[in-house]
Image (tube, rainbow, N blue to C red):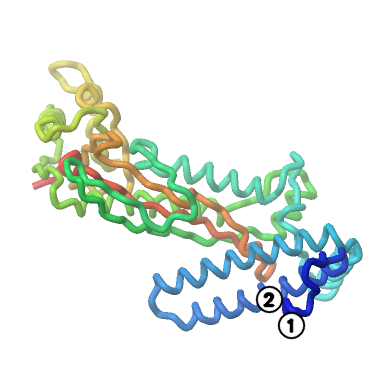
Amino acid sequence: MSKHPLDLPVGRKLSKDEIADALRLSIVAELDAINLYLQLARSIDDERVRKVFEDIAREEKTHVGEFLALLKSLDPEQVEELKRGAEEVRELAGIATQDPKESSDSSGSSEWDWVVKAVTSTVNSVRVFRKYLPVTSIGRGAIAVPVERFGSAETSVLPLTELSVMFRVSQRALDYAESFRIPAELGDAYRAAVEFATAEDRYVLDRLLELKEAVSLGMSSWDEPGSAVAEISRAVGELIKAGVRPPFVLFVSPSRYSKLLAVHERTGVMELQRVKALVSEVAVVPVLPDELAVVVSASPYVIDLAVGVDTEVSYVGPEDGYHVFRLRETLALRVRYEKGVAVLKQV
């Protein structure tokens, strides 16, 4: 399909028309590659391998967009033909297509930018662990992160885990929002944001509960006045004895947190206030079971959350009257000193 390199005289530069031809050939090659990678992905059972092929296919789709953007700048006639083609599809099939870079809301910003901001804002408001643990950005190209354990000269490699959720935005909702100059309805996007943030918290919690050297302590129901304070005090004492220092963060379930709001009869002070004299923060984690509580030293030498792709919203493409998006991130919970984590379990 493309010219052999020897067909071009050495040292000769391509003309504008030849560059446009080269871009068209490149787009064809990228589309062929996308089909190949997706076909291979559908034939692979191993999810880890399949995700690699799917990720490469998405990258190739980005390349198509890059080549097409260049082609539009070189060939005005091509731009008009693309517009005519989109109009014919709308007239014949009733499907309105929209260039993600060109659609706009009443504020004049990109419609997809508005979607991205709405989704990421919701994710940030729902996620819990990431608000209290140190976060290290390692770049979207990373697939693993080194870990040097506290007090050890040995370094291990921790692979990043990918979290992803798909969601759709209705073209009809976008048209309605544009007509009346109001924000578009993003019900499925908000669903995806909450699901995504919850998956992130569950990932962090699972890693914390897997730590073999974490401080393990018993815990009561906290129904008795003062019991929560005594047990959290003991956990903090064990962490300090292990050599870690503040800030300490207590993670509890919603039910446990409500018990901390009880007022101690003899002191007239809420249990929560007394607990906060021991830890810097008390955070409610909906995915945390009622029979568990976790105290963590939120110091970088103890723990951090290594993030590669960071809460990225990417446009996948149109599908049956909708625009499909993918929300994803890659991350790893890097625990350098397991004894800086205390897990309390009700007995």
**Relative to residue 228, is residue 320 depicted above or below?**
below
Q: Quadrant of residue 63?
A: bottom right
Q: Position of residue 143 (x, y in %)?
A: 41, 58
**Relative to residue 319, is residue 347 depicted above or below?**
above
- Residue nearer the viewer, 248 or 73: 73
Amino acid found under the numbered disc labelled 1 = Met
Quadrant of the image for the N terminus? bottom right
Residue 268 in sight here: yes
Q: Position of residue 341 (x, y in %)?
A: 19, 41
Name which residue lies at 55% across and 81% down.
39
Give the structural element (helix, strand or loop) at label 1. loop
Q: Position of residue 266 (x, y in %)?
A: 13, 17
Contact, mark 2 vs mark 1 (Cβ under 8 Å):
yes
**Relative to residue 333, is residue 14 depicted above or below?**
below
Q: Is residue 322 left or right of residue 197?
A: right
Name the residue carrying label 2. 29
Q: What number is the disc on residue 1? A: 1
Q: Nearer the viewer, mark 2 or mark 1?
A: 1
Q: Is residue 63 left or right of residue 293?
A: right
